[in-house]
Image: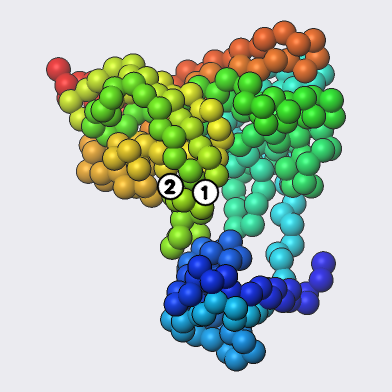
Amino acid sequence: MSTIPEIRTLPVPDGLEGERVDAAIARMFGFSRTKAAELASHGKVLLDGAEAGKSDRVHGGAWLEVELPPPPEPPRIVAEPVEGMTVVHDDADVVVVDKPVGVAAHPSPGWSGPTVIGGLAAAGYSVATSGAAERQGIVHRLDVGTSGLMVVAKSERAYTLLKQQFRERTVDKRYHALVQGHPDPLSGTIDAPVGRHPQHDYKWAVTAEGKPSVTHYDLIEAFRAASLLDIKLETGRTHQIRVHMSAHRHPCVGDLTYGADPTLAKRLRLERQWLHAVRLSFEHPSDGRWAEYESEYPDDLQRALELVRGEST
């Protein structure tokens, strides 16, 4: 892989007149504000040919030149058994797994823990070769801290047809989430674009520059401190449920990244967000039948649910 840095140069739009360099870079190049400020602080940004600091101001028509570091080596799939991951269904075209918490869908930069794709390889499963090298067969993902159902394509035909279903939003993905407080209305739709957080690389946010994102929710059960919701995703953005519920002022219980109350999480002995992919339904790529799979709550989520229910009696 090349070690030569990439140089990208763009003219500053008139609409960014007077913006700080880091803010302008974030808008123009699609970086987070933190990443843009880091590049400027390391002398990687030129404004009309002169080195620019992160707080310098830009003007319309100026040229911003940004030196990007070489891309990291692509992560490799490591065949490694995954404790607690179970196969719900397996045939010639797909394998449906129940993913435990603490497991990523596939390798990625900065993640050295277990993965679904690595666990399948260790168990002797062959998956489709379509997709990037580190995520072959993966047609959708769950957060590391979210448990539940995932489908992985085993054949090239299945990969193509499942990706099409996800693009056309015909796959029915259902989650249960325990959220703080009581949403108003108790059932509804959150329609708000989700994109990279402007300050934090590891977070996402409701932002005007984000992609269209739609989350439908219905109340299952209300408690004194929280509400159990059934959630259907119309779109599948990274962290979508967590971001939408937090923006709606009802973060998932235990989701400290998105503003959940740590004292409630401690009371419920919960060390991650209470969010579980309970049902996954799609048109099976082999014969077109409607296939539906379900998953029970893991022990930690079931325990937290019983504790919050007990507080309400």
Residue 219 visible in image: yes
Left or right: 82 as drawn, with respect to 234? right
Crowd around label 2: few <14 · some 14–19 · many ≥20 (10 Å): many
Residue 174 drawn above or below residue 202: above
Residue under circle 1?
Answer: 210
Q: Secondary structure at mark 1?
A: loop
Residue drawn at (38%, 49%) of the image = 257
Residue shown at 27% from the left, 34% from the top: 180
Q: Is residue 82 above or below residue 71?
A: above
Residue linked to disc 2 = 206
Q: Are marks 2 and 1 in contact (CB under 8 Å)?
A: yes
**Along the viewing direction, whichever of 240 and 226 lies nearer the viewer:** 240
- Left or right side of 93 for 187: left
* Image quadrant where residue 171 sits: top right
Q: How is the image coloured?
A: rainbow
Depicted 172 relative to depicted 72: above or below: above
Observer-nearest of 187 and 276: 187
Q: Which percent across, then down, holds residue 9?
A: 68, 75
Left or right: residue 257 versus residue 96 is left
The picture places residue 79, in percent across and down from the top left corner, at 73, 42
